[in-house]
Amino acid sequence: MRVPIPVKVSAFALLVIGAYTYVANSIPQIQSVPPQELSLEAGSVTREQLVKAGEGIFKGKGTCEVCHAIGQKGTRAPDLAGIGAAAGKRKPGVTANAYLIESLLEPGAHLVEGYPNIMPRADRPPIGLNRSELWAVTAFLESLGGTVAVKLEDIPKDAGAVAGGAGGPVAELKMPGDPKAGQAIFMGKGACIACHKAGAIGASPLGPDLSQIARIQTADYIMAKILNPTAMGTVAGFPPNLMPPTLGQTLTAREFVDLMSFLLTLKGEAPASTAKK
């Protein structure tokens, strides 16, 4: 008796599936255990763990590398090589960790000559580090040529909290404009593209790359930089007085809001995204 072809195909398929199932079940199974989260405030964190966590925050959430380098000149912000040792000598009577903590929470208090006051508070948007993260970053900075001595108690208890003492992150500003219309202004009437790059848009090196501007700067700074460029200082490494001071007059209120909406989308996460004025 001839066996129908469909039956033969089905039997062959079952044979193959059975073989694969046997092989798969013969392989020892390894249980997947997710890594435990490092609790910085648990009291059991080692100095090495703290510094490692701080380095990760420095390179990641803190976005510090966008402006700062370690052992490299010519960046938008001061070179941080050896800052752990230098911090303790910058201001008489101020320890290294106190200097570093204040630099993170009140950046304008310790300006380095040649660099404008453009760094936002590290515990507020757009960066928004919490108290533990500030502790870890400070430890990492201290490790750069110095001795790690910072303690969690050295970080103000209200750091990373809403002004007034309530806990939780500060709400990020949302602009009511149209980002697509703002992109058109960036490329057209505003002529921003003549000097700035914004992700896949533009390529001019005359002004700072804006591809991550919303990650590293506050909305207040961006607004002020558009309306009164000279008052906000010049980013290190770029010529002064390059940005026109007339955008506040040439753009309508709606166009300004749309442009701001577009700039606040630039977080370096998408092709049409990137960093700073």
Image: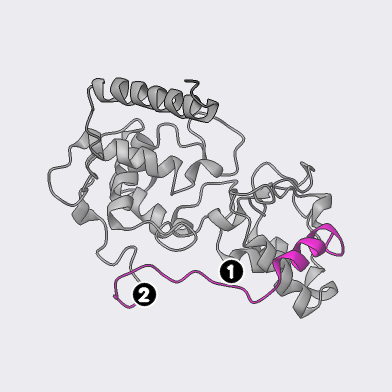
Q: Is residue 144 above or below residue 258?
A: above
Spot the residue most to the front: 1
For label 1, the residue is 220
Q: Looking at numbered disc 2 in the image, what kind of residue is underneath it?
A: Ala
For label 2, the residue is 163
Quadrant (top left/top right/bottom left/bottom right) for the C terminus: bottom right
Left-right relation of 45 to 179: left
Asked where in the image residue 136 lies, by quadrant, the reply is: top left
At which x and y percent is residue 114? 60, 46
Q: Is residue 199 visible?
A: yes
Query: Which residue is rendered at x = 41% and y = 70% of the image?
Result: 170
At which x and y percent is residue 19? 35, 21
The stretch drawn in magenta includes residue 161: no
Left-right relation of 49 to 63: left
Q: Is residue 115 above or below residue 55?
A: below
Question: In whole angstroms, how far apart are the C-alphas of marks 2 and 1?
Answer: 17 Å
Question: Are the residues flagged by discs 2 and 1 in contact, CB closer than 8 Å?
Answer: no
Q: Looking at numbered disc 1 in the image, what kind of residue is underneath it?
A: Asp
Query: Which residue is rendered at x = 59% and y = 38% of the image?
Result: 75
Asked where in the image residue 238 lies, by quadrant, the reply is: top right
* Applied colour scheme: one colour
Could you tell me which secondary element the residue under label 2 belongs to? loop
Q: Which residues are magenta?
A: 164-191
Query: Which residue is rendered at x = 29% and y = 22% of the image?
Result: 22
The stretch drawn in magenta includes residue 189: yes
Crowd rating for badge 2 (residues with CA inside 10 Å; few <14, some 14–19, many 20+): few
At which x and y percent is residue 31? 22, 33
